Structures are given as C-alpha cells and as structure tokens.
Image: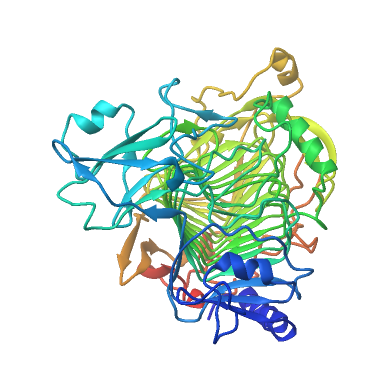
C-alpha cells in the first residue's frame, strides 16, 4: 500500500470520476471518434481538448509521440482533470520521432539528412540551450537542445564534428553532432556495432511532453505514464521553467507513479512563468529580488500557486535537474520518488543542477525519497522558510544537501546521508536532528547577499537580510564512516551540538584550524561582518565512541536497498536525550520564528525513519530507534509502506 496521502487522493480521484466523464485514448482509436471505450480517441491531445473539470482521460497501452498542452485544468481538488494510464497497461509518451535512412561512413559513424518539414515549427537542432546561470564549458561552446537515441539510451553531443567523424565510437560514450542550414538538418552519430536502420533510432523533436502554454492551469493529475525524450531548455529561477513535464505557474497538480527520463535539461518543472524580463539582466541577487517582486504581483501566494504533490515517480537521466522550481514549488510535497543519474555526464555547467533544485521552497516537504548518482541531491536556494527534508536516503552524490542563503526555520530530520560530502551550508536557521552523517560538511561563514524572509507560512516578504554563517542546531544525530562536523567549529551566529554520537573515524566540531570561507561579497561586506562576533560551537551531552566501528554500507538486493550498520543500545542509556519539539529547538534568529509544521501545528519528531514510534522519554540517536546491539541490516528503500 502507498503512503496514506496516496489513499486520500485516490478517494478524491474516485469522487472526481463519479462526477465527470471518462474519455479513452488508444493507438487503435480515431480522433473522429467520441472518446468512449468502444470508440477511443487516437491522440491524448484530442482528449485534452475535450476534457472538462471533473473528467478523466484514460490512456491505453502503446507509444504516443505527441506533445500534450492541456488547455484547461480543474476547478478544485475534488473537481480536477485526471490523465491516467489504464491500469496494468504500459503507456509511453515520447518527445521524439523514429528516424530511418542513415548512411554509414568510416569508423562507427552514420549520417542522416532531414528536411525542415520533418520538424514542423520546432527544430531543436537549430535551438541552443541558454538562460541565466547557464555556463557552457568552454565558455564559447554551443549546446543544441536536440538529442540522439539508440534503443532507448542517449548519445552525448560532441564539441566538434571532427570528434564524430575521425574516431571510432567509445562503447560507453558514443557521440553525435548536427548542422542545420536554411532548409535541412544533417546529423552525424556514432552507433557502435549497430545498424540504426534496423534498430530503434530516435531524435528529440518536441520541447516538452506535458506542459501548459499558459499559467494558472490548475488541479491536474498525471498518473502512471512513462514520459521521455524531450528537448527542454535550461530552466533558471529568473525565467519561465520548462520541464519534460511542468506545471507552468499553477496550483494543485498531482504528478504520481510516472517514469520520467531523458530530458535534455529538466524532468519535472514546478516553477516560474515567463515574462518580458526572462534572462535579461536578472543574473544577480538584485535581479532575483526583482523577479520575486514581480512574482508576488503575479499571484505568488498560497491560495493561487504551488501546493503540488509529486510522489512515487522515477526520475532519471536529466542533465540539469530532476525536479526544478522557482517559487511555483512553494507549499508542495515531494515524496516517495527515486531520483538518480542527474547531471552525470557534465555536458554543460551552471548554477541550477541537482536532483531537486528549488528557489522559494516555502513550507515544502521533501520526504521518503531515494536520491543518488547526482551532482547535488537537494539544493534549496533562497526562501526555504518552513522547508522540511525528512526520511530521505541519499548516497553516491557529490553533495547530499545544499542550503543556500536561507534564513530558516528549516528542518532536516531522520535522513540517511552517506555521500562523501553530506552538507554544503550557506544558510542559517537550520536544525539537523536524528540524521546519519557519513561524510563531510562544507560551510560558508558569510555571504553579503540580501535575501528575503517572510511572514510565517506565507510568501509575503518581511525584509531582506545578509547571510551570516551559523544559527544551526545538530541534535541527536549519529556520525559514522567519515562523518565530519569540524567545519562548524566556529561561526558568526551560534552553533550547537547536543545529544550526538560520534563513532570511529568521525570528527567533532572541536578543531580551531579552519579558515573562514565566504560566499558572494559586495563592497560593504567587511563592514557588515563587523556586526557579528565570531564564536565557537558549543557541545553538550555528547557520546564519543572512538573505539566503536559504526561503519555503514549499502547493499542492493532484489530491487531493494539495505543498510548494514553496527549500533549499540547502550547509547540510549549512557546519554539520555530529549524528544525534539518546537519547544526544544531554538528559534531561527533572523526571522525570529519557531520550528513548526507547514500547517502551523507544533513540531514533534516522535517517529523514526521507518515511521515507528520513538521513545518519547529518551529517543535513540540517529534515524532509527535502537532496540538491539551489534551489526544490523535494515531495508531502507523502498520501505514496505511504499509498495
């Protein structure tokens, strides 16, 4: 059974179905039909044009090569428009076309020439990736939005045509390139020991797969599809953010149980609308403040924007981000997703790459996800006030969590963090409680950018503030492997450690040898810094177990991931701990706000990673309630409740 919220939304969907009409779509249908089960439509877009609030679109097994641009959404959560794959049927929606007629050249290279009529009004081999904070490498290189696929996997774009023509394909890294002229496009591609005319060769031809062409298309459900191969553009926080699937500045979407993969830039976009300022002198902190002010005027508030549910999807092979969102992500829940292989090819660079990259994540909950093989796992940048990162499994990332120029309160609890670097911190107002830390931390001690904080549970901006390091609380965590908190030995605001356990090979925040590190610094930064006094971290109720090997490793067996770790139930009795609540945590200093739940109710961390009740009188350190000593093996993804 899925999470309890899934049951709730299933009930709501059933209500909507009972009130509306059901349209059917099948590859064997006809767009001149009536959309009934006996006479289904042939294309999803025909059904989208027919569907009204409360209606359901059921798509039957097959491959659909089309771009869905929903013309309308639902009226409310109980009267939404539902797009769903038929139960038990494999429905694939592609932003690509099959291409034949390849001619073989030397080595493993093949060539194909296509007329402009093949592409219609969008040719991704004439369109370059661009946008704020997009950094080609080298600086003058151009990247096309198109891509080439063979049997479902993609080839990488070459920097020069000579790379494709003059050497045999590397089996692990075959290349392609394209040149477009006035009336045609020529593509060269390396197919290692494969004839592309007899295998499945495809190229991107559509900018998105499922994306409204205007804002405020609300209350849509997209469930059960495989969606892939889109020629998406770069999605910066200051411009319209396209994804293979995206909500386009709307409210109340449910994106669930899908496979989303092979987007040139972004898989799911929950973000910003477009306006006349897109990518025009907005690539700065001051520029983004202007973007925020315009977004507030264009409806950025809890009653109008955000509140999406993104759950139980598998998101892979996106070169910018798995899920992105600038402000439009606020008040959303992201849970139960597997996000992997994001920005792994390092095709291009920039400041927006992560499995999850959010700006303005006000009251966002990111929970129970499995994130791995990404450059960054979760990157919350600006205004993550009230955000909660809970019970996620993260490993084999360059960095698990990056909190940038936020003022809090932000809660990070019950997570398993096993990458080489667990935290990159350029924020204050964060509480890290009941986590496993298996890697290091990188800390920025001061950033002069002026960034907003808000009224509680609101997008209303109270003021802008600079970003002194510190105002961080580490409570009841377990440090294993190479867990290292030494970068927090000093800060400009208080840093506290309480109730933590350090096992063999880990390092506490007691060193005084670290030099201060800085983020963006304006001309007045040194004077601003004089307002703060550097101070050492404080530590109490600590267990130092230098002789205890608490090494944690992950095993993959039968489609599940298990953690193998040694623990000691004496840790509970040797050093009593307090249950983490709103009252037990210090308020975030800059906004002066308490740690509480997104609905404003008091915080109480009384369950562990598995959802089991904690000992309220004396909870265990780390994400698991400890009942036995010695080496233990626990299934950590997917959990039984996620099946």
| Position of 316 relative to 450 (above/below) | below
Q: Position of residue 155 (x, y in %)?
A: 31, 44
The answer to whether residue 606 shows anywhere in this view is no
Residue situated in front as seen by the camera: 112 or 643: 112
**Position of 246 compared to 186: left or right?**
right
Residue situated in front as seen by the camera: 280 or 24: 24
Query: Residue 470 appears in which quarter of the rendering?
Result: top right
| Position of 476 relative to 624 (above/below) | above
Residue situated in front as seen by the camera: 507 or 56: 56
Q: Position of residue 615 (x, y in %)?
A: 60, 72
Q: Position of residue 151 (x, y in %)?
A: 28, 57
Seen at 53% across and 52% down, the residue is 244
Q: How is the image coloured?
A: rainbow
| Position of 469 relative to 542 (above/below) | above
Q: Residue furthest top?
A: 523
Q: Position of residue 190 (x, y in %)?
A: 23, 41
Query: Residue 634 appears in which quarter of the rendering?
Result: bottom left
């Amino acid at each position: 059974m899925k999470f309890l919220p899934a049951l709730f939304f299933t009930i709501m969907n059933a209500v909507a179905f009972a009130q509306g009409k059901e349209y059917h779509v099948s590859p064997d249908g006809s767009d001149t039909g009536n959309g009934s089960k006996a006479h289904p439509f042939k294309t999803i877009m025909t059904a989208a044009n027919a569907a009204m609030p409360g209606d359901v679109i059921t798509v039957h097994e097959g491959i659909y090569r089309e771009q869905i641009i929903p013309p309308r959404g639902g009226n409310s959560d109980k009267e939404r428009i539902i797009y769903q794959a038929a139960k038990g049927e494999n429905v694939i929606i592609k932003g690509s076309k099959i291409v034949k007629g390849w001619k073989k050249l030397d080595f493993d290279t093949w060539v194909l020439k296509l007329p402009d009529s093949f592409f219609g009004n969008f040719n991704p081999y004439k369109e370059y990736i661009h946008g704020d904070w997009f950094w080609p490498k080298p600086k003058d290189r151009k990247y096309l939005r198109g891509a080439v696929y063979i049997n479902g996997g993609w080839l990488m774009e070459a920097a020069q045509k000579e790379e494709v023509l003059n050497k045999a394909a590397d089996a692990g890294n075959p290349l392609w390139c394209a040149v477009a002229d006035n009336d045609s496009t020529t593509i060269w591609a390396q197919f290692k020991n494969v004839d592309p005319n007899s295998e499945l060769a495809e190229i991107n031809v559509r900018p998105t797969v499922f994306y409204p062409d205007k804002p405020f298309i609300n209350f849509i459900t997209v469930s059960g599809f495989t969606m892939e191969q889109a020629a998406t553009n770069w999605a910066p926080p200051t411009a319209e953010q396209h994804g293979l699937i995206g909500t386009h500045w709307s409210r109340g979407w449910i994106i669930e149980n899908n496979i989303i993969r092979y987007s040139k830039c972004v898989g799911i976009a929950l973000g910003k609308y477009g306006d006349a300022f897109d990518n025009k002198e907005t690539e700065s902190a001051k520029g983004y403040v202007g973007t925020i002010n315009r977004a507030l005027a264009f409806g950025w508030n809890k009653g109008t924007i955000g509140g999406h549910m993104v759950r139980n999807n598998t998101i892979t092979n996106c070169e910018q981000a798995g899920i992105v969102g600038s402000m439009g992500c606020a008040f959303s829940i992201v849970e139960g997703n597997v996000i992997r292989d994001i920005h792994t090819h390092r095709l291009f660079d920039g400041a927006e790459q992560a499995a999850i990259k959010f700006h303005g994540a006000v009251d966002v909950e990111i929970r129970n996800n499995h994130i791995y093989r990404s450059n960054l796992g979760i990157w919350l940048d600006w205004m993550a006030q009230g955000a909660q990162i809970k019970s996620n499994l993260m490993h084999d990332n360059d960095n698990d969590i990056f909190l940038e120029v936020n003022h809090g309160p932000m809660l990070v609890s019950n997570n398993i963090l096993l990458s080489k670097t667990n935290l990159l911190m350029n924020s204050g107002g964060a509480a890290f409680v009941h986590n496993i830390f298996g890697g290091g931390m990188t800390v920025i001690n001061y950033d002069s950018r002026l960034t907003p904080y808000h009224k509680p549970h609101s997008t209303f901006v109270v003021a802008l503030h600079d970003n002194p390091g510190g105002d961080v609380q580490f409570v009841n965590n377990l440090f294993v492997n190479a867990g290292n908190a030494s970068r927090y030995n000093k800060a400009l605001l208080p840093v506290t450690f309480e109730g933590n356990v350090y096992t063999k090979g880990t390092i506490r925040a007691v060193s005084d040898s670290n030099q201060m590190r800085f983020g963006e610094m304006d001309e007045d930064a040194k004077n601003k810094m004089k307002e703060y006094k550097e101070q050492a971290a404080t530590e109490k109720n600590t267990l130092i177990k230098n002789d205890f090997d608490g090494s944690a490793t992950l095993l993959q067996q039968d489609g599940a991931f298990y953690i193998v770790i040694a623990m000691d139930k004496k840790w509970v009795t040797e050093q009593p701990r307090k249950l983490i609540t709103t009252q037990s945590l210090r308020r975030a200093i800059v906004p002066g706000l308490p740690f509480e739940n997104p609905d404003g109710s008091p915080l109480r961390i009384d369950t562990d990673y598995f959802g089991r009740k904690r000992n309220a009188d004396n909870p265990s350190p780390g994400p698991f309630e400890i009942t036995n000593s010695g080496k233990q093996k626990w299934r950590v993804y997917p959990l039984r409740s996620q099946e």
